[in-house]
Amino acid sequence: MTTAENELKALMVASQDGDAVAHRALLERLSRHLRAYYKNKLTKIGRGAAEAEDLVQEAVLAIHIHRHTYDPAEPLTPWVHAIARYKLIDFLRRTRSSRADVPIDHADDITAHDDHGGAESNLDVRRLLKLLPANMQCAIEAVKLDGLSTAEAARRCGLSESGVKVSVHRGLKALAALIARRVEP
């Protein structure tokens, strides 16, 4: 882990323990980081600093409200980036922005993942999968994460092929519901 990650994580853990000074310091540091993140993303699609500032405030508020959900055993920055990305996506939906509104030279920039995207997504998916029944976990991991065929997944999970298909379908639906509950402020 980087020094910045360790410092931010220590501030978050202290914040979760009720240290108001650490909480203020955490939110100030995250605000600076998020401001740069949003300005970079929004400038590429012709949006202004005021909109970036609104997003910073939304993200900081979400971090403040949901800080109890952060697991100190995990890295902090992927958790923060997930919140920031969700807020950006919500903003783009609210303002009816789409790829069609983005100059073609910048379309990949606004939709590209940050450095933590792959690790963050993997951590999020694995954490959410643990909340599902074992047959759904196995089927989703085998088919969607490991790329196995339905027949191969059936052998691995001890299910019929139709059982794998049903487990994947129901499991993805359950994951979507879990994600929706976690994203709502």
Image: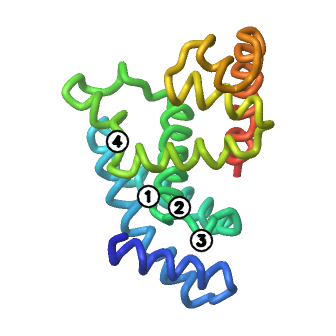
Q: For marks 4 and 2, give the one nearer the viewer.
A: 2
- Secondary structure under badge 2? helix
Residue toward you, 81 or 161: 161
The residue beneath circle 2 is 57
Which mark, residue 72? Answer: 3
Q: x%, y% of residue 12?
A: 56, 76
As drawn, the residue found furthest toward the left would be 105
Which mark, residue 53? Answer: 1
The residue beneath circle 4 is 47
Which mark, residue 115? Answer: none
Sequence-earlier tag: 4 or 3: 4
- Secondary structure under badge 4? loop
Residue toward you, 14 or 166: 166
Q: x%, y% of residue 174?
A: 76, 31
Q: Are marks 2 and 1 in contact (CB under 8 Å)?
A: yes
Residue toward you, 17 or 149: 149
Q: Residue at x 50, y 38 (%)?
A: 89
| Disc 1 from disc 3: Cα separation | 28 Å
As drawn, the residue found furthest toward the right would be 133
Q: Amino acid at mark 2?
A: Gln
Q: Amino acid at mark 4?
A: Arg
